[in-house]
Image (tube, rainbow, N blue to C red):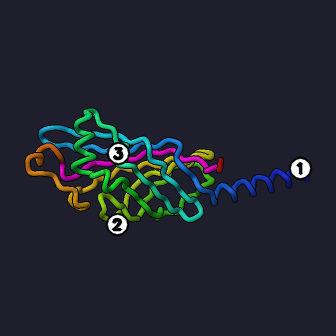
Amino acid sequence: MKHLLVLVTALVASLSMSAQIYMANTCVISFFSESPLENIEAINKAAKPILNTSTSDIQVKIAMNAFVFEKPLMQEHFNENYAESEKYPYAVFKGKINEKVDWVKDGEYKVTVTGILSLHGVDKERTLEGIVTVKGTQITISTKFNIHIADHKIEVPSLYVKNIAEDVEVKLNATLEPYKKK
């Protein structure tokens, strides 16, 4: 009887873990623009990705004005002239993991996620490659991809063409845990 109780408890725990909402307790999104005159890098630690393990849906909402730059003037130019953060306060990615991930088995999974990236008022379908790592009750996600800024109608004045790259490298690393209502 004792073994049956342990088996039932383990089964209920595994079923509840496989159909949970996970939310990031830590997330770092960075971008890097390499150009002949200067490199530009910014980091954002304010995003909270959400993952539904029963559907493999993932969503990330990024406050554009939360990117922090080395130089305050770069941050000001980014928010006012390029991201237009007052007009377009958020970038959002909504997608679905294409591969099957065993959410209750520790391991590392190479995945692709197909979805819509909404940036600067422009929606663009994207398929991103990434790594999902399951370890206990934590899920870590990481990805690295490029954004062609013209695809999102971000214009660079001709005076600054040598300062800002046409393609910007974006990295996301997040650790998610089961969401608990407070």
Query: Label 3: which residue?
Result: 65
Residue displayed at 53% across by 43% down: 25
Magenta-colored stretch includes residue 22: no
Check if mark 2's residue and mark 3's residue have beta carbons within 8 Å: no
Determine whether the residue tagged by mark 3 lies in a helix, strand or loop.
helix
- Where does label 2 land, which residue? 125
Element on which disc 2 rests: strand
Give me the residue at 27% from left, 43% from top: 32
- Mark 3 or 1 closer to N-term? 1
Would residue 63 be found to the left or right of residue 55 on screen? left
Q: Nearer the viewer, residue 45 or 168?
A: 45
Would you say 96 lies left or right of 43 here?
right
Q: Residue 75: x, y in percent?
A: 27, 40
Which of disc 3 and disc 2 is earlier in sequence?
A: 3
Q: Which mark is residue 2?
A: 1
Q: Nearer the viewer, residue 117 or 181?
A: 181
Residue 180 x %, y %? 64, 49
What's the magenta region? 165-180
Q: Amino acid at mark 1?
A: Lys
Task: Characterize the local packing of mark 2: few (<14), some (14-19) or many (20 or more) Cα atoms within 10 angstroms.
Answer: few
Q: In the displayed structure, does residue 48 sit left or right of residue 155?
A: right
Furthest residue toward right:
1
**Is 108 situated above or below 72?**
below
Label placed on residue 115: none
Of circles 3 and 1, which is in front?
3
The kind of secondary structure element at disc 1 is helix
Residue 120 screen position, x and y as percent: 29, 58
Vertical relation: 4 (above or below) 160: below
Q: Residue furthest left?
A: 159
